[in-house]
Each structure stands twice: as structure tokens, then as C-alpha cells.
Amino acid sequence: MMFTIPFAIYGLFRYLQIVHIKELGGEPELLFGDKGMLANFALWGISVVIILILSTLLKYDLHVHSNILSMWNIRTEVIIKLAIKKGLNGIAITDHDTIKGGVECKKFETDSLKVIIGCELNTRQGEIIGLFLTEEIRSRDINEAIDEIHAQGGLVTVPHPFDKMRRSTLRHLSDHVGKIDAIEVFNARCILVDTIKRLRVCKEKNISATAGSDAHYANEIG
């Protein structure tokens, strides 16, 4: 695992650079010129440094579904065991349109694993996630729902934006940038191109980024 992650980060760097060069009308082969070997070693070194830095950070999976609504999803007590086994520091239970799963999972919280009560809410305009909730969100209008979440002291994130495969995805993200707290940049069920697009939006709009597995099954957590 320690060796595959740097390779993945290196691959992402290469992909971003190639995309950038193509946008400028150039050829990927011209990326490094005569200093190709040196540049490759530099990128590998950066990848390793990033891994070392990440290893010191808290690791939270901020998009997990329990079996509170579906028998096929993961039992709450199993979620805790798997999250601890995978070295997570915390998880957010974000079942669809209810905080019941999060409330139940909170009962199994430990000193080493914190549980955030959340909800993936399907509003009329598209899905949002509320984190650090204490009550159910009643409204299905996105603006009213955001206000409800903030009134509880919660945070609002937008899950899997730009994912064209999901009908429930929030389509007009730019209309709500001023009211949301973060964008889910990495979703394990989304393609890399969408992830890169979300990163760009976070940078352009100065919005925080989150990551989540969107786990519905045990092997997806973390």
C-alpha cells in the first residue's frame, strides 16, 4: 500500500500536466524535454513527501451509508469495526433523507473513532449533505434546507457534483456557492475527470474540499 499510493499520486500529477499541455495545444511528449529523468524523480519525491504529510493528518470518511434504510447496506456496529480496522479517525453517517443511521451509529463511537451525524438530503434542486446534525431536516427546498442545517450548527457539503450518471446530483452548483461550506471533491464512486473538475472549482471559488467513500457496502469504507 505504501508504494502504490505514491504511484497513484504521481499518475495524477502526470495526468494533470498532460491535460494542461493539451489545453495549450502542445504534446505530452514535450513535457520534460531533455530533463525528463530528473523531472520524473522530482515528481516521485513530491509524491512520497505528500504521503508522509498525509500520514500525520486525521483521516475521516465523510460519506458513509448504514443499513437504517436498506438491509443491503452496512450494519452500524460493523461500520465502526471496519473503520477502526482501516485506521480511520472518524466517519460521517449520511443516510438518505434521515439522521437515524447516524444517531444509531453514534452509540458505538469510541475514543479512537468519532462519529458525525449527517444526512444526504435529496432536495428539489439536487442532493446536499448536512454534517453535525441534531435534528431531521424538514424542508426539501435547497435554500431552506441549508438554513436548517446551519441553524443546528451544522455544515453543508455538496456530494459528487458534476456526476452526470446520477439524476439526484446538484446541477447548478454555482447558484449556491455562497451558502455551502464545502464540496465533496473525492467520491470513490466517481471518475477521475470529475474529481479534477471539483478541485478546480474549490480553488477558483475558495471553497473547502471533502472526501468520502459513498460506501454502501463493507469493502467500500475508507
Image: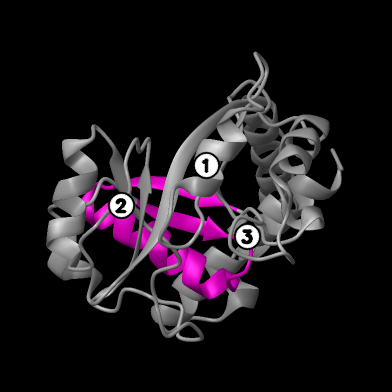
**Which portion, as a residue range, is magenta?**
183-212
Q: Nearer the viewer, mark 1 or mark 2?
A: 1
Q: Based on the picture, tell me whether residue 113 belongs to the magenta stretch.
A: no
Q: CA distance from mark 3 to mark 1?
A: 33 Å
Whether the residues at callouts 3 and 2 have beta carbons within 8 Å, the answer is: no
In the image, taking residue 118 as reference, residue 3 lies left or right, namely right
Label 2 crowd bin: few (<14), some (14–19), many (20+), radius 10 Å: few
Q: Nearer the viewer, residue 220 or 17?
A: 220
Q: Which x, y percent locates residue 221? A: 72, 49
The residue to which callout 2 is attached is 203
The residue to which callout 3 is attached is 12
The residue to which callout 1 is attached is 102
Q: Quadrant of the N terminus?
A: top right
- Do we see residue 168 in this rendering? yes
- Do we see residue 60 in this rendering? no
Kind of element beneath mark 3? helix
Q: Which x, y percent locates residue 50? A: 63, 34
Q: In the picture shown, does residue 94 fall above or below 165?
A: above
Q: Which x, y percent locates residue 121? A: 36, 62
